[in-house]
Image (cartoon, helix red, strand yellow):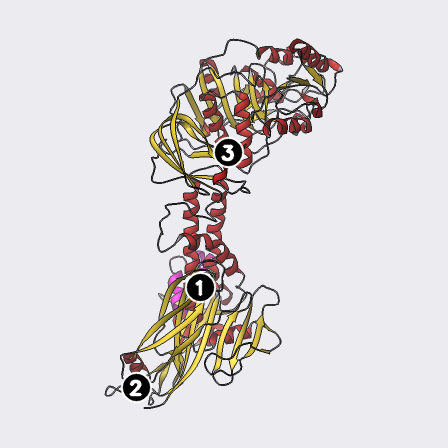
């Protein structure tokens, strides 16, 4: 054992020398004179405690055997209080009473289910509740409270560090506001609980109330919460710097204490959990006795089976314990793995009602140590957990069943697909509704991101992540559906190319490395790109076959090929095959949509818009076949067809923040009347306002309060007469296949076919 202090001079230096002499141990002033594994007593005044010294002492204890935090800080508001704290470390008696947990950032429906414990959660953490608990007997306190050095916030007031009897306490000026007499003290008196009145012998406090005095508003004032708690505590575990509140650490400290772990063991595991939770690096230290045993402890009975490698299955059976503490041989995982995640499987029991299940897992020597706990004890026949080196965003848990046609591979690809889809929004085919669906997908991903953070310590959080990913994926699929409707519905062939060409910059034309897949002739490339974005495309043009393809070039180009013929016997269907390759390095689903236009009806697909949805592996080449109904062609295409007039669709997209208040109850009718008048005469929208009549009342609508979309259509007469043969289907056909991936990339292949009468 070794005693360390910043200086042997002064009253605290003398106390350090006195303690070292009593223990017959070395007294040092530098950390480099302490060997790993030695028990350490750090004696200093609060203002002289060094964050750098504490960090170095933590490293000695945390990262070397025997893997426990065997370091005790002895300090106090005065040297006499520090001496009293040291003397309490050697008392034989241990205070009894109820074990209390106080966490404001916790739902009220969480339960402790421990006859010797009491949980104060959310708005139950009040000054009266803590005072009553102390009056009834408080054996320990595990608290997670926001605040500052000088106070911690309760629901109805403050837990303050000012001494109960400030007149009997010798402070050096200047005095903190609520220590001296005056209005500030009187204002706080009714809703302030003095921390030095709490009698718990073992205390844990997580939050911004630091052990040191040279931070926050407690600078140079030895009157803050921690020093006041040390008036009665035999052992205190808390932070020595401002730290984020971690509610699950209130549960962890309580579970460890109730299972018989010493303060040195508890502080070690709390520090490890802070790191694996992704929150802080070794925030906790011990003041007082690091070796005292808890006054009472619960059962720690359970059996453990470990199966598998890389993704290990933990089967815990016959469970009656407050915490599960087990080890997995490190060689079951990759040697470079440094993060481990635990998930509670759905095929095991779910004890503890609505309570969450937490974990920490880390390397310790030749093992991976795994701790699992909740609020209150586990009592169950069996629990099943998965331990892996990845979270849900990379690797869905074992037993995940496809949900609504979502496979695990599809879900884990959603975040990348959303990001890539957002990068193509520069293209005009991506309309307002598609962008809206993408925004909804991004919102769901932000929710998934928050759930991912919880997966570092919550064994149940992955279920929320999966739900958020499903929402993001559904919105992404809706965006793809909207994109298909906006870009490909009721369009003539090559309209997609025209839209891109009209809204992008062009590059230097070139000749493709490969020949046309249809005629073998050269293919001339016309590159297009977004000079201010990330996407670029190549339009391939064959002199014989017209357009051949239009594909992204931000990755390896994968050109869809179409094969089929309108020649042949009088078959009921005409087969058209589409062959294409997934250009992505991950799995994806894709919608393949076919369009066929005829020269006699250049603005409409002659067979509707048949589509097929497929799932693709990374780089997978796929071939699928469409069966075109010959009778449908017969009903649409005829050499004698002539136009039957036209129609006009007008869609009004109002600013509802104006329409709602302005046209109360009639807003929908105003929109309908605008669309009706606009279909008859679109020129009415050229002015600054439009007038409509509703129930005899003339209403004026400013044109800048709505957007207008006008779609002109050419109608054609239906064919009549006797059933015709394939010979009647003569003329040019442009066949186009659009492959839309999960990330909204469009791979387009085109082919012009000519059919002569047979």
- Residue 221 placement: quadrant: top right
Figure label count: 3
Circle 2/circle 3 CB separation < 8 Å: no
Between discs 1 and 2, the one toward the N terminus? 1
Residue 558 to residue 322: above or below:
below
Q: Position of residue 446 (x, y in %)?
A: 50, 49
What crowding class fits label 1: few (fewer than 14 Cα within 10 Å), some (14-19), or many (20 or more)? some
- Residue shown at the point (51%, 71%) measured from the top left: 551
What crowding class fits label 3: few (fewer than 14 Cα within 10 Å), some (14-19), or many (20 or more)? some
Of circles 1 and 2, the one toward us is 1
Drawn side of residue 547 relative to residue 162, left or right: left
Q: Is residue 647 visible?
A: no
Drawn side of residue 667 relative to residue 367, left or right: left
Of circles 2 and 3, the one toward us is 3
Say which mark, if any, is on residue 367: 3
Drawn side of residue 448 relative to residue 613, left or right: right
Drawn side of residue 265 relative to residue 381, left or right: right
Numbered disc 1: secondary structure = loop
Say which mark, if any, is on residue 620: 1
- Residue shown at the point (38%, 20%) measured from the top left: 115
Position of the N terminus, as image quadrant, is top right
Q: Position of residue 384 (x, y in %)?
A: 37, 37
Q: What is the distance, in whole Å, between disc 2 and disc 3 at their CAs? A: 75 Å
Between discs 1 and 3, the one toward the N terminus? 3
What span is in magenta?
Answer: 657-674
Say which mark, if any, is on residue 434: none
- Residue shown at the point (64%, 14%) measured from the top left: 82
- Residue shown at the point (53%, 82%) measured from the top left: 522
């Amino acid at each position: 054992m070794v005693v360390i202090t910043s200086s042997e001079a002064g009253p605290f230096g003398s106390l350090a020398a006195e303690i070292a002499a009593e223990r017959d141990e070395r007294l040092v002033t530098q950390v480099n004179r302490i060997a790993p594994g030695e028990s350490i007593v750090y004696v200093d005044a609060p203002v002289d405690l060094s964050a750098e010294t504490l960090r170095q002492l933590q490293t000695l204890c945390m990262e070397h055997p025997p893997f426990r935090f065997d370091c005790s800080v002895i300090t106090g508001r005065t040297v006499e209080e520090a001496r009293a704290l040291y003397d309490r470390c050697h008392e034989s008696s241990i205070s009894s009473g109820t074990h209390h947990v106080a966490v404001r950032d916790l739902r009220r429906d969480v339960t402790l289910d421990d006859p010797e414990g009491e949980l104060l959660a959310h708005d139950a953490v009040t000054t009266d509740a803590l005072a009553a608990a102390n009056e009834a007997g408080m054996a320990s306190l595990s608290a997670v409270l926001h605040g500052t050095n000088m106070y911690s916030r309760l629901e109805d007031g403050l837990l303050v560090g000012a001494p109960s009897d400030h007149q009997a306490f010798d402070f050096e000026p200047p005095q903190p506001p609520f220590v001296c007499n005056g209005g500030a003290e009187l204002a706080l008196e009714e809703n302030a609980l003095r921390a030095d009145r709490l009698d718990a012998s073992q205390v844990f406090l997580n939050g911004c109330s630091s052990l040191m005095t040279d931070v926050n508003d407690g600078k140079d004032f030895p009157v803050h919460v921690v020093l006041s708690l040390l008036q009665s505590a035999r052992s205190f575990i808390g932070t020595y710097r401002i730290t984020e509140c971690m509610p699950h650490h209130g549960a962890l400290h309580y579970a460890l204490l109730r299972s018989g772990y010493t303060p040195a063991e508890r502080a070690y595991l709390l520090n490890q959990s802070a790191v694996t939770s992704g929150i802080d690096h070794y925030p906790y230290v011990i003041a007082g006795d690091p070796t005292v045993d808890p006054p009472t402890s619960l059962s720690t009975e359970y059996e453990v089976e470990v199966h598998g490698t890389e993704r290990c299955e933990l089967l815990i059976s016959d469970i009656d314990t407050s915490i599960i503490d087990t080890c997995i041989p490190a060689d079951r995982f990759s040697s470079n793995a440094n993060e481990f995640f635990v998930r509670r499987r759905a095929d095991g029991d779910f004890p503890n009602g609505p309570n969450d299940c937490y974990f920490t897992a880390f390397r310790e020597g030749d093992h991976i140590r795994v701790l699992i706990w909740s609020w209150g004890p586990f009592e169950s026949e069996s629990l099943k957990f998965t331990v892996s080196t990845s979270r849900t965003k990379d690797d869905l848990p074992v037993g995940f069943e496809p949900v609504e046609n979502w496979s695990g591979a599809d879900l884990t690809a959603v975040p990348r697909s959303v990001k890539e889809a957002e990068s193509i929004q520069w293209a005009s085919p991506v309309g307002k509704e598609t962008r809206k669906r993408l925004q909804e997908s991004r919102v769901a991903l932000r929710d998934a991101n928050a759930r991912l953070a919880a997966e570092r310590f919550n064994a149940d959080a992955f279920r929320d992540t999966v739900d958020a990913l499903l929402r993001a994926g559904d919105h992404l699929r809706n965006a793809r559906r909207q994109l298909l409707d906006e870009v490909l519905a009721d369009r003539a062939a090559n309209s997609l190319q025209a839209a891109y060409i009209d809204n992008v910059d062009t590059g230097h034309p070139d000749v493709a490395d490969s020949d046309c897949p249809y005629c073998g002739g050269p293919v001339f490339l016309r590159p297009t790109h977004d000079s201010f974005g990330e996407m670029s495309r190549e339009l391939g043009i064959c002199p014989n076959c017209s357009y051949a393809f239009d594909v992204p070039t931000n990755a390896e180009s994968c050109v869809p090929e179409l094969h089929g013929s309108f020649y042949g016997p009088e078959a009921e269907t005409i087969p058209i095959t589409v062959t294409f390759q997934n250009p992505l390095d991950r799995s994806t689903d894709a919608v393949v949509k076919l369009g066929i236009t005829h020269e006699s009806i250049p603005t409409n697909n002659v067979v509707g818009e048949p589509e097929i949805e497929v799932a693709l592996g990374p780089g997978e080449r796929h071939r699928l076949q469409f069966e075109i109904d010959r009778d449908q062609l017969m009903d649409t295409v005829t050499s004698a067809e002539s136009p039957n007039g036209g129609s006009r669709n007008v869609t009004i997209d109002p600013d509802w923040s104006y329409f709602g208040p302005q046209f109360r109850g009639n807003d929908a009718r105003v929109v309908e009347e605008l669309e009706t008048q606009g279909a008859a005469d679109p020129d009415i929208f050229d002015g600054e306002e439009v007038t409509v009549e509703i129930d005899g009342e003339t209403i004026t609508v400013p044109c800048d309060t709505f957007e207008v979309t006008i779609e002109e259509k050419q109608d054609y007469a239906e064919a009549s007469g006797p059933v015709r043969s394939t010979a009647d289907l003569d003329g040019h056909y442009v066949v186009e296949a659009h492959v839309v991936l999960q990330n909204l990339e469009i791979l387009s292949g085109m082919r012009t076919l000519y059919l002569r009468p047979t």
